[in-house]
Image (cartoon, helix red, strand yellow):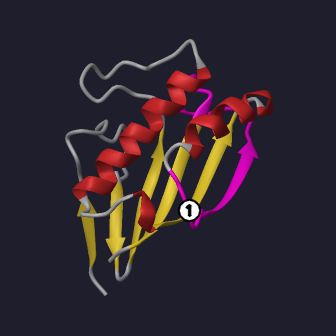
Amino acid sequence: MKKQVILSNQAPAPIGPYSQAIKAGQFLFVSGQIPLDPVSGELVSGDIARETQQVMQNIAAILNAAGSGWEQVVKTTIFLTNMGDFAAVNEVYATYFSADFPARETVAVAGLPKGVRVEISVTVLCP
């Protein structure tokens, strides 16, 4: 099976030795996204809801580049540095799904890249 690198200029460029996403067989694996603005390259910060919105917009851009969408997401992982942010993150997250919700876990971590408070990755079943 050959893998295909997915890259969107509407999402932040990778800041290390990884791809935004890899399509392998029937699956698309989207790397964890943090609240980086793809235009300015600056972190969106100050409000966890705003940060989560940027993360979800970054994921949406990658899904779009792969010819997919939120309805195809089968699994998400949310990483938080403070579980006290869970309700606010969940409120934004929920606006991206309307039915047949993906499997999910939320993990509290000691730290995330660039000191951000939220990172989300997704696995997608490709049409």
Picture quadrant where residue 112 is located = top right
Residue 85 falls in image quadrant: top right
In the picture, the quarter occupied by the C terminus is bottom left
Considering depth in this image, is 3 or 61 the residue closer to the camera?
Answer: 61
Q: Which residue is mark 1?
A: 99
* Nearer the observer, 85 or 1: 85
Q: Is residue 103 left or right of residue 59?
A: right
Boundaries of the magenta span = 97-118
Can residue 116 be seen from the camera position used here?
yes
At 52% from the left and 53% from the top, the residue drawn is 97
Which residue occupies 23% across, 55% down? 65
Horizontal side, residue 40 vs residue 104: left or right: left
Location of the N terminus (image quadrant): bottom left
SS state under label 1: loop
The magenta stretch spans residue 112: yes
Determine whether 43 is above or below 75 in the image.
above
> Which residue is the extreme one toward the top?
46
Q: Is residue 51 left or right of residue 18?
A: right
